[in-house]
């Protein structure tokens, strides 16, 4: 299957602390494992895929794009 996220770039991060419900964290860890399997590399740390997921979500949210243009 083709995941929406590919390999994760190692970029200089900005620290952000969030609390996730346990089921969301389990799914995040499972998604990281799937990325590792699909890429043939070690699974990234689940915390490393949060930013690309949010970035992808915002990039594909048409209402958000319209709101930014209207600004």
Image (spheres, helix red, strand yellow):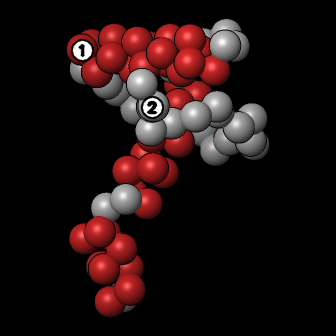
* Direction from residue 27 to residue 7 in the image, left or right: right
Q: In the rendered image, which residue does mark 2 sit on?
A: 3
Seen from the viewer's position, the closer of residues 30 and 40 is 40
How many residues crowd around disc 2 within 10 Å: few (fewer than 14), some, or many (20 or more)? few
Which is more N-terminal, label 1 or label 2? 2
Quarter where residue 12 is shown: top right
Where residue 40 sits: x, y (%)? 66, 13
Where residue 31 sits: x, y (%)? 43, 19
Q: Is residue 7 visible?
A: yes
Whole-Å distance between the Cαs marked 2 and 1? 20 Å
* Direction from residue 57 to residue 52 in the image, left or right: right
Seen from the viewer's position, the closer of residues 29 and 18 is 29
Q: Is residue 60 above or below residue 10?
A: below
Q: Of helix, strand and loop, which one carries label 2?
A: loop
Seen from the viewer's position, the closer of residues 59 and 48 is 59
Q: Of helix, strand and loop, which one carries label 1?
A: helix
Q: Is residue 47 above or below residue 63?
A: above
How many residues crowd around disc 1 within 10 Å: few (fewer than 14), some, or many (20 or more)? few
Q: Residue at x 64, y 33 (%)?
A: 8
Where residue 2 sits: x, y (%)? 45, 31
Q: The C terminus is located in which quarter?
A: bottom left
Q: In the rendered image, which residue does mark 1 sit on?
A: 23
Q: Residue at x 64, y 44 (%)?
A: 14
Seen from the viewer's position, the closer of residues 38 and 24 is 38
Q: Nearer the viewer, mark 2 or mark 1?
A: 2
Where residue 7 sits: x, y (%)? 64, 31
Quarter where residue 53 is shown: top left
Q: Residue at x 42, y 25 (%)?
A: 1
Q: How many marks?
A: 2
Q: Is residue 59 above or below residue 26?
A: below
Residue 54: image tag: none
């Amino acid at each position: 299957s083709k995941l929406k996220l590919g390999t994760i770039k190692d970029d200089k991060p900005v620290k952000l602390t969030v609390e996730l419900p346990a089921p969301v964290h389990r799914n995040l860890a499972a998604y990281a494992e799937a990325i590792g399997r699909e890429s043939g590399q070690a699974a990234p740390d689940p915390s490393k895929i949060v930013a690309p997921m949010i970035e992808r979500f915002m990039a594909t949210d048409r209402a958000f794009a319209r709101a930014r243009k209207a600004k």
